[in-house]
Image: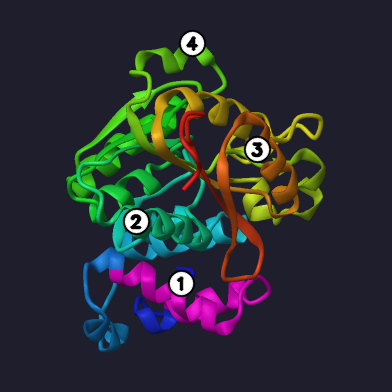
Amino acid sequence: MFVKKNTLKEIKLYFKSKLSTLYSDNEIKSIVKELTIQRFEINTIEYISFSVTRLSESDLLFYRDAVKRLENEEPFQYILGDIWFYDLNLKIDSRALIPRPETEELVDWVATDFKEFFQPIVMDLCSGSGCIAFALKSVLSTSQVIAAEYMDEALELIEENGRRTDLDVKIESMDVLNYEDFKRFQIESFDCWVSNPPYILNSEKALMAPNVLEHEPEISLFVDDEDPLIFYRVIAENAMIYLRDGGVLYYEINERLADEMTQLLEEIGFVNIEVRKDLQGKDRMMKALKVSSRHESK
């Protein structure tokens, strides 16, 4: 046996002995706590007295497998199998990117802008796990929300999160780089589009942590340096067709490309373009308004 006794106290010592070079003591304590609470379906109060509970062989194997995956630098969120995002508990695994706090900030911007809007029609493009779509549906109760995604594996994950949250989000399989795929929608029928597309340059890979590079889906992360705004450009060009007059486009962006993004959206015809910083002080979000030529901008 890899531990002296089959108790959580011994498991904590085991985690510390194996993971101290990768994680701080506090991080290790938090990892063990979260795994245990999920595994045994207990609450924080019950966890305090759980240290002396005898663990079964399958429980011990569960913890040992978690350690092996952590030693391989697999993200803890994938090992845990779920994540809290905008007060929703969503399933997450290697089929989609792990939702980040800055994406919650983007959701909050959209939700705040549309909280008084009755029955807005919203689309989340490059939806991944569906986190943006489900979060918006959860707070914009009268909204019609569409989650658009290209990868079959991610589409399956969105379906699973739909069942988990019991939120009515329509799922569309589509390639946002294919103009033909947008023709299924009615022209000028949307009030809001929001997207967190791939935006990390291939040349920036060297700056990425191993747990991201080796485990999160590369297709959802990186774009060619030669055309880093390809997703933003195609989505914005279609947004000018399918957003209503007064419709709003929101993006999560690469902090290094805010100026280029502003120029791109101006050239396409958007107005009232706003860049917003995330809590880390980085240019991370953008908002742009579609106004037809027969109206002045608001």
Using residue 42 as the reference point, say whether residue 16 is left or right of it.
right
What type is the residue that disc 2 sits on? Answer: Ala
Q: CA distance from mark 3 to mark 4?
A: 24 Å
How many angstroms separate mark 4 from mark 2 (CA)? 29 Å
Mark 3 or 1: the one toward you: 3
Tag of residue 266: 3
Q: Which is the main secondary structure of the residues drawn in magenta? A: helix
Please, what secondary structure does the residue beneath circle 1 have? helix
Q: Nearer the viewer, mark 1 or mark 2?
A: 2
The mark closer to the camera, 2 or 3, is 3
Q: Tell how many labels.
A: 4
Is residue 65 visible in the rendered image? The answer is no
- Residue 133, given in percent of the width and then of the height, sits at 34, 44
Residue at the image position 77 percent from the left and 46 percent from the top: 205
Instruction: Estimate the x, y position of residue 123 in percent, counting from the top left.
Output: 37, 35
Decide which of 207, 181 is in the foreground and name it: 181
Relative to 27, residue 154 above or below? above
* Figure check: 147 above or below 109: above
